[in-house]
Image (tube, helix red, strand yellow):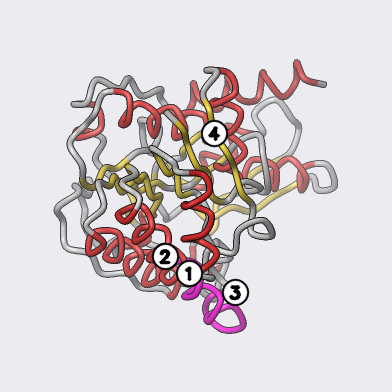
Amino acid sequence: MKFLVTGANGQLGQELQKLLRERGLDFMAFDSKQLDITNRVAVFATFEQVQPDVVLHAAAYTKVDVAEDAGRELNWQVNVNGTKNVADASKTYGAKLVAVSTDYVFDGTKNSDYVETDAVNPQNAYGRAKLAGELAVTESGADAYIVRTSWVFGEFGNNFVYTMQRLAATHSKLTVVNDQLGRPTWTRTLAEFILHLVDVKATYGVYHLSNAGTTTWFDFAREILKDTDVEVAPVTSAEFPQKAYRPRHSVMSLEKSEATGFEILNWREALEVFLTGLKNAK
């Protein structure tokens, strides 16, 4: 079985490559310079060359605030047109596709966990583009899994854990939003789940995947910095305005994903394992 990975330089793309190597699986990974997914001719030519059995589509435009203005066009080109190209090529060449989406397809007004069949209502440009990308995958007719995730952190790239650690090195007090509820996702857990879906031949469709347990950004930050002397203080979203709307309640149900037989670590455990690994690497 041969895998093709898009977004090779991203947080998830690098994690997927690490896991594929560990498992001795055959894959080829492409970053945006090696494969511009917005170039339909290039995408089909790459599929013709690689002849993948499984496509792990981790490429994405993820600058959520920039997508509201300066990055609006690129956001749409990558997350919609690029995803459509990858999905259509997967259908043409008979490859299974796993495409990654986001909790931002929801508006965050539901008071209970979002299930995969809940009505979508994205409130920012990034969420609207990712939803349009989901529709492109579905409409392609490819054998596909769409995995929605949230609050991603991990070894590679920029993420909330690294941001908190960096700020803690130069500040004695940090203020963090405490009125947005969600579920952090370790890239390792996400990568393992993506391969799990393929391994167990799960039913195609939409799945929600994060680590278990819920938290706020404030409590997430406190857990990250619990072994430091830095004070972490709560603030409201109104006190910390951002260009793009963030869902207030972004908790997605994990029941469907767990029903595939995948065991999901609690986010605190996942964070602990991740941080321990970082310390040991140093």
Q: CA distance from mark 3 to mark 1?
A: 25 Å
Instruction: List the residue tagged with mark 1.
Output: 40
Quick one: label 2, few (<14), some, or many (20+) residues within 10 Å?
Answer: many
Q: Are marks 4 and 1 in contact (CB under 8 Å)?
A: no
For marks 4 and 2, the one nearer the N-term is 4
Q: Amino acid at mark 3?
A: Val
Name the main secondary structure of what is drawn in magenta.
Answer: helix
Circle 4: residue type: Phe
At x 33% / y 70%, what residue is drawn?
132
Disc with the residue nearer the chain's start (4 vs 1) = 4
Q: How crowded is the residue under tag 3: few (<14 C-alpha within 10 Å), some, or many (20+)?
A: some
Looking at the picture, how far across and down is residue 225, in whole percent?
Answer: 67, 33
Q: Quadrant of residue 128?
A: bottom left
Tell me where residue 88 appears, x and y as whole percent: 34, 61
Element under disc 4: strand
Camera-side mark, 4 or 3: 4
| Quarter residue 33 falls in | bottom right
Amino acid beneath label 2? Asn
Q: Which residue is mark 3?
A: 66
Q: Which residue is mark 4?
A: 27
Dots 1, 2 in contact, CB < 8 A: yes
10 Å crowding of disc 4: few (<14), some (14-19), many (20+): some
Verify CB contact (< 8 Å) between mark 3 and mark 2: no
Magenta stretch contains residue 69: yes
Residue range of the region highlighted in magenta in the rendering = 66-79
- Which residue appears at 36% of the width and 44% of the height? 98
Q: Which mark is first along the chain, 3 or 4?
A: 4
Residue drawn where x is 21% and y is 57% of the image: 141
Q: Earlier in the sequence, mark 3 or mark 2?
A: 3
